[in-house]
Image (cartoon, grey):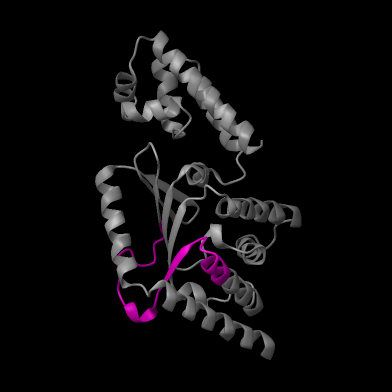
């Protein structure tokens, strides 16, 4: 399902939610209270700004007695996503964000990956997979990177730990090209990128990626990821604490100019290794 068609389907989901809610004589706040979300979130579901979690869709079905309509629709829309279920919600929000701040401790973020780097990552996790499956995963990853080419792209601020520059994903030749790509994006001002060097020592949320998103008409959200699982966090106190941690990491990182110098040097190191093989 194309992005436009999927968005139209989510808009239908929202329209039906509003219709059933009004037929039940409930305000957004009243429905939200009964399914354990805010009334504002119900409004965002109805406007197709945000997608509910599965358990929320199930509670809405139970409360409004819709015979499982919202759960079935949710499952169909998520099934048609080109991403894993735990990441699908974050991918939708990514396209709506006005600002994205990301910390990557071990891997180049998906929005910044080259096709070769993405392929090496997917092969590492799926060594026996069919070629068609790997190509499908790579296509989904590269399609995401188009976001940075849009005129309305979000402000994108990334902090990479130096570890990310040193791990030779795929090969040293692939890494050299990947780091060249980062440098190009920086020079084209598509991304504001800093490197947290080894010399920075201990820092908040060591080893944990985090991804803070701001929106025009919705509260900020944080996405974090573990092994085959992801979490969208939007409780204000938690989001504020995570943003503070990101600010501390950003303050300890090298300047963008010094970061670019380090990235170029790391690329040359990988290139020398590739040429000596």
Q: Residue at x 32, y 67 (%)?
A: 249
Where is residue 18? Give x, y as percent.
Answer: 44, 17
Residue 234's image quarter?
A: top left
Where is residue 108? Give x, y as percent.
Answer: 52, 65
Q: Quadrant of the C terminus?
A: bottom right
Q: In which quarter of the image is the N terminus?
A: top right
Asked if 95 appears above or below 9 in the picture, the reply is: below
Q: In this view, does 245 lie to the left or right of 218?
A: left
Q: In this view, does 128 lie to the left or right of 203?
A: right
Q: Is residue 158 left or right of residue 142?
A: left
The number of callouts visible is 0
Q: Is residue 53 visible?
A: yes
Q: Is residue 209 magenta?
A: yes
Asked if 251 appears above or below 151 in the picture, the reply is: below
Judge by depth and name the residue closer to the eye, 75 or 214: 214
Q: Residue at x 40, y 24 (%)?
A: 59
Q: Residue at x 55, y 72 (%)?
A: 183
Q: Residue at x 56, y 46 (%)?
A: 84
Q: Does the magenta stretch include residue 55?
A: no
Judge by depth and name the residue closer to the eye, 229 or 195: 195
Residue 63's image quarter?
A: top left
Judge by depth and name the residue closer to the eye, 44 or 64: 44
Residue 8's image quarter?
A: top right
Where is residue 208? Give x, y as percent.
Answer: 39, 62
Q: Is residue 277 visible?
A: no
Q: What stretch is highlighted in magenta?
A: 182-210
Judge by depth and name the residue closer to the eye, 42 or 36: 42
Where is residue 23? Give x, y as percent.
Answer: 42, 8
């Amino acid at each position: 399902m194309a992005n436009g068609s999927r968005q139209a389907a989510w808009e239908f989901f929202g329209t039906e939610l509003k219709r059933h809610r009004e037929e039940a004589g409930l305000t957004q706040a009243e429905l939200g209270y009964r399914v354990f979300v805010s009334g504002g979130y119900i409004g965002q579901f109805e406007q197709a700004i945000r997608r509910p979690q599965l358990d929320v869709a199930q509670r809405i079905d139970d409360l409004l007695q819709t015979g499982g309509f919202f759960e079935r629709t949710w499952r169909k829309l998520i099934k048609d996503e080109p991403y894993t279920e735990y990441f699908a919600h974050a991918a939708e929000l990514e396209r709506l964000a006005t600002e994205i701040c990301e910390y990557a401790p071990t891997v180049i973020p998906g929005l910044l990956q080259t096709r070769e780097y993405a392929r090496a990552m997917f092969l590492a996790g799926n060594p026996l997979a069919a070629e068609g499956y790997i190509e499908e995963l790579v296509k989904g990853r590269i399609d995401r990177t188009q976001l940075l080419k849009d005129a309305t792209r979000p402000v994108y601020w990334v902090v990479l730990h130096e570890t990310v520059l040193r791990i030779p994903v795929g090969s040293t030749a692939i890494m050299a090209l990947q780091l060249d790509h980062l440098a190009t994006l920086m020079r084209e001002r598509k991304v504001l990128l800093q490197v947290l060097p080894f010399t920075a020592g201990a820092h908040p949320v060591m080893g944990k990626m985090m991804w803070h998103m701001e929106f025009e008409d919705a509260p900020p959200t944080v996405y974090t990821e573990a092994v085959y699982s992801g979490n969208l966090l939007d409780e204000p106190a938690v989001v504020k604490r995570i943003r503070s941690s990101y600010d501390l990491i950003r303050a300890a990182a090298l300047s963008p100019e010094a970061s670019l110098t380090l990235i170029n040097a790391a690329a040359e190191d990988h290139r020398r290794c590739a040429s000596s093989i």
